[in-house]
Amino acid sequence: MKKITDYLKSFFEEFIVLLNNVPTLIVSLFILAVIGMNLLANKSINTGLDWLALDCGIIFSWLTFMTMDILTKRYGPRAATMISILALLINLILSLLFFAASKIPGVWGESFVPGNEDTINTALDKTLGGTWYIIIGSSVAFIVSAFVNNFMNWGIGKALKEKPNSFVAFATRAYISTMVGQFVDNIVFALIVSRVFFGWSYIQCVTCAASGALLELLFEIVFSPLGFKICNSLEKKKIGQDYFDYVREKRNKEVNV
């Protein structure tokens, strides 16, 4: 029991040091992207193709993965995953608050359409309040894909020995990890939610996951120069050095025990 308590204490201490060493704007954008991605996933996109299913969550999901790539490049996969868990927890708390708001008696401003007030008001409440299986499915899919993306990005970076800090190296690890991570996110969600609750076929699940991954890759290609510049800025200014020193000292203590 004491070992578990000591581990948790050490974990939270490291987590606090990490938060103090990651720019607030990056963490804020990451959390915003996770919340926006899950909220807009409620609206599907009419592609005109029966086998192709997309949702408006793609408007934010590219930012989620680009931010994870930046965090992984600068702070490592463990740190990026820790912040991913934080974003997920905040999203779940916000989902509970949205659910509570949907149960509060009242009328939405957009529901004032003669003869349809109750229908529209109920629809808005249900959209904002969310559905339990969608929230659970998206949460599981996100944390699994975050783990895959962060550690794959890191692993590819380790394998690139020649000019590891170049744009080509950054783009290579970001493009591959984003496409695979987004595919994992989409396929896990599709199998948990779309297949079970909406009767999607396995072909629809796979094509949705693949098409979403390709679209995310396109966003990553467009915005990767910005991500690369941010990473370079963090490294040149040595932002996060206190966290690296803390981790190094912590590991040295563990070795000497």
Image (cartoon, rainbow, N blue to C red):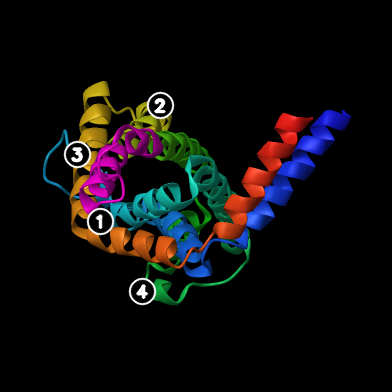
Foreground mark, 2 or 3, reads 3
- How far apart are the two marked residues, 4 and 3, measured between alpha carbons? 37 Å
- Secondary structure at numbered mark 2: helix
Quarter of the figure with the N terminus: top right
Question: Where's residue 120, x and y in %?
Answer: 41, 64
Q: Residue at x 63, y 44 (%)?
A: 248
Residue carrying label 2: 196
Q: Nearer the viewer, residue 111 or 10?
A: 10
Q: Residue at x 54, y 46 (%)?
A: 79
Q: Earlier in the sequence, mark 4 or mark 3?
A: 4
Report if the CB atoms under discs 4 and 2 are less than 8 Å apart: no
Question: Residue 113: which disc?
Answer: 4
Residue 181 quadrant:
top left
Residue 149: say if magenta: no
- Secondary structure at numbered mark 3: helix
Foreground mark, 1 or 4, reads 1
Question: Residue 224: which disc?
Answer: 1
